Amino acid sequence: MSGTERPAGGSCPSTGLGTLRRGVKALASTGEAVLLVREEHDDGSAFWTLPGGGLRPSESPVAGLRRELREELGCAVVVGRPTDRVWYAHHSRAGTLSSYDVYDCAVASAVEPNPAEGTLEARWVAVDDLPPRTLPQVRSLVGRHGPPT
């Protein structure tokens, strides 16, 4: 998502405070490994996560996931069923909580990271060999689901 687009969201429902950012993530697999992307926090520290991002207002999750993977990785994706949800409290964006719906996906073309979209690297990794600095939420989710088939 470029810096000029506003993600769908609103007040955090449980407290009425802060901002809830809705997004989508892809749990894509070769059957033996999952696709992760390396991005940077606002402070410049790198982390690994699932590909995807924020939804635009009134954008469906499937359309948003296809758009995000096209922007971040230049690839087409076949979106399957929703499989989980992960939450992320932003340290660099005070008062922002993201809720990402995670979908089983199949990548249907070559993957080419787009640094202009904040995607520095993409890698297929074995579930038992996730890179250091993989977000804890992603580690937990991948551990629960393993690579989809």
Image (cartoon, rainbow, N blue to C red):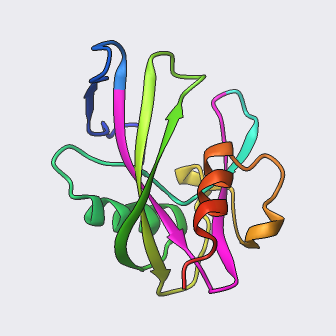
Q: Is residue 126 above or below residue 54?
A: below
Task: Tally the marks.
Answer: 0
Asked where in the image residue 143 lies, by quadrant, the reply is: bottom right
Observer-nearest of 57 and 146: 146
Q: Residue furthest left?
A: 58
Between residues 148 and 47, which one lies in front from this camera angle?
148
Front one among 49 and 109: 49
Majority secondary structure of the magenta segment?
strand
Q: Is residue 63 left or right of residue 54?
A: left
Q: Position of residue 65 (x, y in %)?
A: 37, 63
Out of 48 and 100, give the one closest to the viewer.
100
Residue 129, position as x, y percentages in the image: 83, 66
Q: Quadrant of the C terminus?
A: bottom right
Give the vertical position of 13 relative to 73 (above or below): above
Q: Residue 22 in magenta?
A: yes
Q: Residue at x 20, y 43 (%)?
A: 57
Name which residue lies at 27% across and 24% down.
13
Point 45% across, 76% down: residue = 105
Q: Tell me the magenta residue range.
A: 20-42
Question: Where does the image place residue 9, in percent across and percent down from the top left?
Answer: 27, 33
Q: Is residue 88 above or below residue 148?
A: above
Q: Looking at the rendering, which quadrant does residue 102 occupy?
A: bottom left
Q: Position of residue 38 (x, y in %)?
A: 69, 54
Horizontal relation, residue 32 to residue 20: left or right: right
Q: Is residue 109 magenta?
A: no
Compared with 107, 104 (above or below) is above
Furthest residue toward front: 144
Q: Residue at x 35, y 23 (%)?
A: 19
